[in-house]
Image (spheres, grey):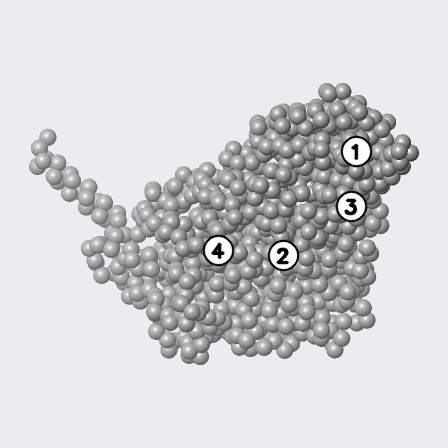
Amino acid sequence: MSIKRILPLLVLVLAGLGALFSGPLTAQERPGPLRIIIDEGVIEPLPFAVPDFIAENAAAREYAARITRIVAADLQSTGLFREIPKEAFISSVTSFDAPVQFGDWKAINAQALITGAVSVSGRRLTVKFRLYDVFSGAPLGKGLQFAGTTASWRRMGHKVADAVYSRITGEGPYFDSRVAFIAESGPKNARVKRLAIMDYDGANVQYLTDGRALVLAPRFSPAGDRLLYTSYESGFPRVYLLDLGSLRRRALDEQPGTMSFAPRFSPDGRTVLLSLSVGGNTDIYSLDLATGNRRRLTSAPSIEIAPSFSPDGRQIVFTSDRSGSSQLYIMPAGGGEPRRISRGKGRYNTPVWSPRGDLIAFTKQNKGRFHIGVMQIDGTEERLLTSSFLDEGPTWAPNGRVIMFTRETAGAGGTSALYTVDTSGRNLRRVPMKGAASDPAWSPLLK
Amino acid sequence: MDFPQGMAFEEEALPRTGMIVSGALHLGVIALVLLSPFFRSRDSARTVATTEVSLISPEEFAALTVPEASRPEVPRAEIALPVPAPEAEAAPAISPERPEEPQSRPAAAPLTPPEPVAEEAPKVETPPAPPVAEVEDTPPEPPAPEALALAEPPSDTPTPREAPRVAPEPAAPAPPEALPDEVLREEVSQSPEAVEKKPETEPTAPPEASTEIVTEAEKPASSAPVSSPRPRARPARPAPPVAVAKAPPAEAAAPEKDGKDAMAAAIAAAVEDAASTPAPVASSPAAAAGPPLSRSEKEGFRLAVSRCWNVGALSAEALRVTVTIGFSLTRDGRPEPASLRMISASGGSDGAARQAYEAARRAILRCGARGYNLPIEKYEHWRDIEITFNPEKMRIK
Amino acid sequence: MKHLKKIVLLIAVLGVSACTDPGRFGPGAGGAGAGAGAGLGGAASDPRSPEYFRQTVGDRVLFAVDQSTLSPEARATLDGQAQWLLDNPEYSAIIEGHADERGTREYNLALGARRAAAVKEYLVARGVAGTRLSTVSYGKERPIAICSEESCYAQNRRAVTVITAGGGV
């Protein structure tokens, strides 16, 4: 076949292709829409403005200002939002019902605007708010109103912030929640530890034990009404169940010669998992709270500890050192052959199943450092979020987006503090509170 | 030892005239609440505290609401629960063709999603808009000082810097005299028309940005007492975003375990895109529409929108949604707010799609507030636009 | 002389029994292993005194990182402990297991339990009645040395045999 014979063909084909790709547009033809694919964006805090909520009567003045600050602080604390300082505001909001000057807010690049009003009548406090998408000049969602007592003003702020946060991000709310933890004081070799509870943001700390007995690692019941924790008040570590309404407590599973610790609730709140040490061997047991029936779930000579239920209650992730170092395993809720999920180097501990069920948070110890990390439930996509001398004990925010944990500093004067980090690894920050603290346990969302 | 007084909210509901009006709806909502296993489990147990949450009645809300064309649907239900039930009425309106389904995240439910078409109506008068470069304005908000306790030694490793902003193009920290600012004041005072569009030459320095999220664990080893090399790099880290952004589609398809479909879709779309976009070398028969956009013009536009596409405040679920938005531009390159609509969304629930759409909409409106820089002679080629926002790569940053 | 000895013993028993009160595990106590005072342990020169046990026999053994196996030195110490307990049947012992701070709280509790059990098993194998020995773990909660260096960690990875009154149940 000679070139000459192919040439016309080639020319034809090329011409055809040319027509295909750059066919001239006739005057009548209007081109279709320009199609663009964008797969690169930015990740930065979304700027928002929250002018002081309007006090609708004199009694509300103080509350209006305070609640506004709670809303701003909550949003800002997520790292997903950035408050635009008042000094930058062009227009002020003088009435809850006045039309919004979107232009003024666009000019300062406020992408979300929150307006609100507070009224107080006796002990009754009412907060209403609206959220606007400034650049589309329209409200986002409906206005909402919350009512409660004046003493609960902080919770009202948290609820407004929760509504805003959820509406913009699509994440579940979590600001209106509490954290149980261990308040610490005293020197390192004689720490005083007290069971305590506070708002998620470190406010309203209340102590639940007096510090005479060593207490460790509380856990919330799924309904948030009870706590499990470990106390040495008998001289030996035992698991206790504390009712937060009555503050009555009882020891679970008292057996001479054994130690019980590391308790966790099942998702239905009826069963407790705990670790029992008998003759130096620690295994995981489940305990029916109603009947007291105990069932052994693991029976290896190794240490089996730190169980955590999947949110559907069907599986348990836990730590075992059967391989020679502590690693994470998953087994059926009724016990059975465990499947190892942690594969990386180092030692893994305190696995906690996310409330969304998609991730497992854990403590990892490797090469002299401690990390809080997350992995898929099959152990893949491990990602370390933190790194320090000593980080441990992750607990999930009710929405599964934020993790709180203990960070301890080194040395003779080392102390513990609570930190939070986003599951993306961003926004590592210390929980603002006075005094040292450890072993946080995040409550479910309050009702 | 006691809880402070007043911690518990009363569980009473305010009597409201609106309740009568919307009684039927109430019953529906209550039935939903009762049937929902989520609430059943909560109801069964006592809590530390309860709260009363009351939505405003339609009448009240109407009274409260400013007379705006874009006013959202008034609430029609009063719920005495802090976590709203999955309400049928709150199904996202952004995607009429999608069937209504209960929200997976109840908290988002009581808020009526905006009607994307109607809502932009009122404020079309072009307000003083922020200059394009203002998108970059994010003062580095350091986390609590303690959080940064780990000193970051000067490093020659190519580890990305930790910065509060993640953007396709890394930016050095702003010099102190050019701190990122809320407002470029000298420009805000002017009318947007009077200002030349020169986003690249803004006096304000862009905020410090890294090309990906750097977790504490990924930072170079600090001067901590215990020596430690930095942890192993994450597996399957994508290629540097900048490179990827400019790479041909085939190369962009870095192996991703969970994102094959999305990536395949992206590739397909990209191929389609490439096919439908004639090369700029076209022999130019001077048609009315003018020659199509050149690759660089298209790229410039793409970059302009992507600068404003902030996915930082999106939920993990919304970050799985690929959303396509259609809209029209005016001759001066501004998006016509009423034209914005969601054409399609895939990869998540309607709720997640709504958040994804809203973030994308913000990008288009915000960066286009002063008009996109597009050649007017090719207006017919860019009057109608469809942008597909694929967050695949942003998810794993 | 014989009476004096009895009195001393009585005081010692009273003192130690105060320490076996459940309340002793309050803050700062940490068991005898954590500090100087095991109550009134009698004179260190008296071979039958708990103080002698602490100082001369040696009340603690140390472990390697994440281990509960007994070293030859540990065994030698425990041989002495076993002999002392056999010679002094009026005493019992609580064995406290401890860990250094380089582990998670709950895992270290289990590790301490393992160490305490290893000591108990050894003493039982040497003829001490199991009913005279109980175990408890403090994990990393009661370090005896508080620096964050291996020199301190090594001291904290320990099992301490704390002598208590009574000859066992």
Tell me which amino acid carries mark 3.
Answer: Gly
Q: Nearer the viewer, mark 2 or mark 4?
A: 4
**Taking the image as drawn, is residue A312 in sight?**
no
**Residue occupied by mark 3:** C26
Answer few, some or many: residues within 10 Å of disc 4's Cα (few below 14, many 20 plus, some between 14 and 19).
Answer: few
Q: Chain of mark 3?
A: C
- Residue B147 point in image, percent of width and height: 55, 56
Residue at 22%, 61% in the rendered image: B286
Q: Nearer the viewer, residue B312 or B367?
A: B312
Q: Which chain contains the residue that carries disc 2?
A: A
**Circle 1 residue:** C46
The part of the image, by quadrant, that contains residue C20 is: top right
Q: Quadrant of residue C6?
A: top right
Residue A160: where, in percent of width, then height? 66, 62
Q: Chain of mark 4?
A: B
Residue C150 point in image, percent of width and height: 56, 41
Residue lying furthest right in this view?
A: C3
Query: If you read the primary sequence from the N terminus, does the residue marked by circle 3 or circle 1 appear first?
Result: 3
The residue carrying mark 2 is A431
Residue B319 at x, y = what percent?
51, 49
The amino acid type, in three-letter code, at marker 4 is Ala
Vertically, is A98 above or below A174? Answer: below
Three-letter residue code for mark 2? Val
Badge number at residue B151: 4
